[in-house]
Image (spheres, rainbow, N blue to C red):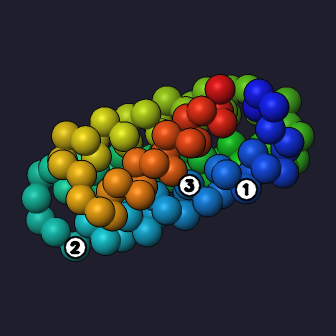
Amino acid sequence: MQGTSRSELAAQLHRCAEVCEDAAAAYVVRDDARDRELVSALMLAAAALDTARRAVDERAPVVPTALLIAGTLARDAIEAAERRGLDAWLVHCVAELRRAVEACG
């Protein structure tokens, strides 16, 4: 949360979770092992980002742990996207994920 207000952090986490969910929905229809790995990584990241957002909004004592988990799973999603190969959709998603990783500190 370095230099970011709680509301800004929560908004960033929410935005990234939505982008991950949208990207996962776009790739779930394909039947390719790389796409299945990507969809799993994106959905895990989205869930962790949303959990962290709720913790931030509620000022819960688990915020540091939630941010650590969200950052870790966001990095995993970035790696899965890069392994799959970046198209225009994933470039946008990876950019959001990188911002979220930085926000998670």
List the residue tagged with mark 2: 29
Q: Quadrant of residue 27?
A: bottom left
What crowding class fits label 1: few (fewer than 14 Cα within 10 Å), some (14-19), or many (20 or more)? some
List the residue tagged with mark 1: 11
Estimate the x, y position of residue 93 in percent, counting from the top left.
42, 55
- Residue 96 left/right relative to 102: left
Q: CA distance from mark 2 to mark 3?
A: 21 Å
Q: Residue at x 12, y 52 (%)?
A: 33
Q: CA distance from mark 3 to mark 1?
A: 9 Å
List the residue tagged with mark 3: 16
Q: Amino acid at mark 1?
A: Ala
Count of numbered circles in the view:
3
Is there a contact, CB below 8 Å, between mark 2 and mark 1? no
- Residue 80 left/right relative to 58: left
Residue 62 visible within the image:
no
Q: Amino acid at mark 2?
A: Val
Q: Residue at x 66, y 36 (%)?
A: 103
Q: Amino acid at mark 3?
A: Cys
Q: Quadrant of the C terminus?
A: top right
In the figure, 55 relative to 22: above or below? above
What crowding class fits label 2: few (fewer than 14 Cα within 10 Å), some (14-19), or many (20 or more)? few
Q: Residue at x 84, y 51 (%)?
A: 7
Residue 21 visible within the image:
yes
* Nearer to us in this view, 36 or 104: 104
Q: CA distance from mark 2 to mark 1?
A: 28 Å
Question: Which mark sits nearer the N-terminus, 2 or 3?
Answer: 3
